[in-house]
Amino acid sequence: MTNYLTRRLLIAIPSLLGISVILFTILALAPGDPFEELATNPAIPPDVRAHLRASLGLDDPIHERYWSWLTAMLRGEWGYSFVSRIPVDQLILQRLPTTIAVIGLAQIVALCIALPVGVYAATRPYSLFDQVANTLAFIGFSLPTFFTGLLMILLFSIYLDWLPFVFRTDIEATGLNWWWQMLRQTIMPIMVLGLFQGAAWTRYVRSAVLDVIRLDHVTTARAKGLPESRVTILHVVRNAMIPVVTLVALQMPAVFGGAIVTEQIFRIPGIGSLLVTSILSNDTPVIMAVTFVFAILVIFFNLVADILYGWLDPRISYR
Amino acid sequence: MNEDDLRQMIGRVQRGSLSRRGFVKRMAAVGLTAPMATQLLALSGISPASAQSVPTYAPSRRGGGGALKILYWQAATLLNPHFGSGTTNADASRVFYEPLAGWASDGTLHPILAAEIPSTDNGGLSADGRSVTWKLKRGVKWHDGQDFSADDVIFNWEFAKNPAVAAVSSGSYRDVNVVKVDDHTVRVEFAQPTPFWADAFVAAIGQLIPKHLFKDYAGANARDAPTNLRPVGTSAYKFVSFAPGDNLRAELNPNYHMNNRPFFDTLEVKGGGDAVSAARAVLQTADFDYAWNMQVEDEILKRLEANGRGKVNIIENGNIEFVQLNPTDPHNEVEGERASIKSQHPAFGDPAVRQAMALLIDRNALQQFIYGRGGPATANFLNNPPRFVSPNMRWEFSIAKANEILDAAGWVRGRDGIRAKDGVRLRFIYQTSVNAPRQRTQAVYKQAAQRAGIDLELKSVTASVFFSSDVANPDTYTKFWADMQMYTTTMPQADPERFMNQYVSWEVSSKANNWQGRNIARFRSEEYDRIFRESQGELDPVKRAALFIRMNDIVVSSNHIIPLVKRPLVSASLNNLKPVLSAWDGTTWLLGDWWRET
């Protein structure tokens, strides 16, 4: 096991280096610079802009910039945002709680919908419940989140005027009232993301469970006279979870990465909106940090998924 | 009415034999607007009553107004006026920092940290135009209780001009010299006579940061200053919290230097999202009091306004959407450079073609069907302040006339209906940025041009590429490797000197200056250069205004520059909110004067 872990971690190093080289090159090749807005302002002479570029090292060759970024990263310095001139790690930490709360809750909502609905639908295939669940799942994952988000805003904020559609981090309430206000403003984005994710997962859970439920060991368990609930939970679901775990684990980095479109629609100050604004303003240190952390998390959760397989299915061994 | 009459009348007002109101009335009779008339008076040293530039402030005590909530669809990222690029950041830091003076909407200066606006009468302006003396307001305190003094002003000059600091404001400070006269007086000295003296310490670029908090960070470590994110200024609102890219909170400053101000107890500036939903949050659900820069189709705004909760504010400024016809050849290289200044455009070299092009754009249709209230048609390039507006230019839309002109100039239609002469076909590449109204304008232009035998090939480039200064990219607007292009140019100051320098020959954008020259249109005229130089040294405001009007007429009548529509500032606010907005200064320039009617 330890051997396996070390090997996996060692393999991760060249892949991360490769990812960072690709990211950096693409960003360096992309047009534009963080001082675009200054270019159209006649009050700022071109040489001031040129000096600003030079002061941030934007005029150095790509490989030099990459090298200085890499060595700083290895020392644990994430660099400064070009645009807001504050350390990138602070910027990310400031936004992480909101993203984790909103996206994390959305994933939990999705799991809470997908698991019971998917399992129940699979145990009674082609029943009325299964048909309805299937139809709803299809509708759910064919509607993009930006569309359902706008529909929800129109219905709940504008026509009914029940919920606010501008997310505010500073709510001037305390105690229970604060929680109530927070719930009111987060419920729409959580439901939009949760229902979308839940709909997709329901389909996967259902098909995974359907595959297992026909196997001989399930028939044997039933023949032994075990109660149906015990058969489903211990003998079916546990075996059906392997593909689902992969899916959920791969989705976990998104909890950190945020939901770009949904965050923009509801004005949630999360990592996703940070990424969008920094891409639009060519803020390379921030884009690099967010995407790079994202890459690390993808690799990490892949590893976690692989380890979970072993726990779910003892036949899988690590060498 | 000629210049002499005008001078005589101004003289009568000065001597007191004609009232200011009488003067304004007489000017109105000959077709000059009231702002222009007051402008002429102000420039001749007769100070206008301040009530005319800034609306009256009614509340009779400080505070008690509750919360003021402002929505920006772009979010502020830092709060140091010397570092922030872009309007959003300048506006956000303006919530806390104040300049010596700001620009009121009519193009006059409004004193903020200055005791009075310098003029020749009060001795603030020297007769030779080489210096301006600012008297500072006394008794002003920073939010942390320290006194504001001339040392702070001097410090800002040293800070901004220091190359190690790399301030975006350095352009306004590095060529002037600032001298401390006493604790409450500073003198700004210029190398040459400077008619436009109100740049350093004025408006967005002039926001003053406290010396006592920045003095240890006045070099390469300027970005580490903790005060960059926790501003301590002199304004009506004190800092509470700031999340970059999200929101900004402030509270009433009980020691503000203006009586009875501010009205609101707390202030919140939320950023992010998109313009349409921002308009909704004000006009439809009234969740916010004010929304900035409503780049939304006018039809949608009108529908939202119909809810009766809020209104749309339209402030005329100098921004203009216009078309440039390339005087140089963008398709062939001369000495290794496309659109080289040494080449001539094969078709636009002929004034008849340019004249026809100017006749082929229906500005009325643009105003009515595309831009609405956000884009009134105009014939001038220089549209504001009123004293600089040329009365001589007219625009016309006539396909028949364009055809006549082209026929007369010998451009004959070929078999495909496209005109040609000596092997040159009237087929042009027309580029602009990706933006719905611009693509619709392109289509309108193309249709009309087709009927005159001119084929326009439409090209649209993503805004982040088109407006970038990337030297390696061939599609940037500064390279102008197309026959014609269209965009909006902004006029950030009430004085047109910086605005009109975009047509002087020494600013031509070329390979030699990495396409950073301001003259992107590559317009050249000896007469224009001469008049521009003259205006730089002309201290008489009336003569100077006449020079700028002449410059406008030269570029517009050359038809290399085709003005389309003005682009006023559009914002949304609740009906009971009384915001004080300006065409020449940031949204938050006089936030302390905002109040709510109850």
Image (tube, coloured by chain):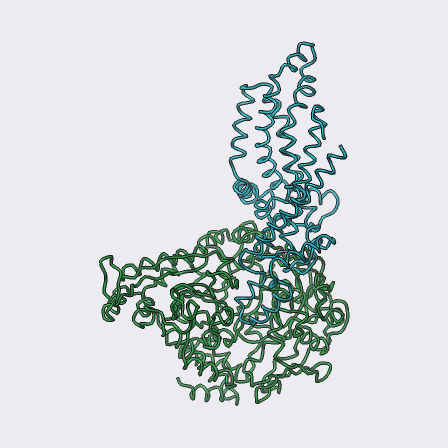
Which of these two is toward me, A94 or A253? A253
Which of these two is toward me, A141 or A209? A209
Which of these two is toward me, A100 or B104? A100
Corner quadrant of residue A191: top right
Q: Is residue A268 left or right of residue A40?
A: right
Measured along the vertical axis of the image, is residue A118 above or below residue B407? above
**Residue drawn at 60 percent across, 16 percent down:** A214
Q: Is residue A184 left or right of residue A146?
A: right
Q: Is residue B66 visible?
A: no
Q: Quadrant of the N terminus of chain B?
A: bottom left
Task: Indicate the colour of chain A.
Answer: cyan
Q: Quadrant of the C terminus of chain B?
A: bottom right
Q: Is residue B534 visible?
A: yes
Query: Residue A250 location in percent, x, y?
Result: 63, 37
Task: Indicate the colour of chain B.
Answer: green
**Residue drawn at 54 percent across, 34 percent down:** A141
Query: Residue B558 location in percent, x, y?
Result: 36, 74
- Picture mark count: 0
Query: Residue B409 location in percent, x, y?
Result: 25, 71
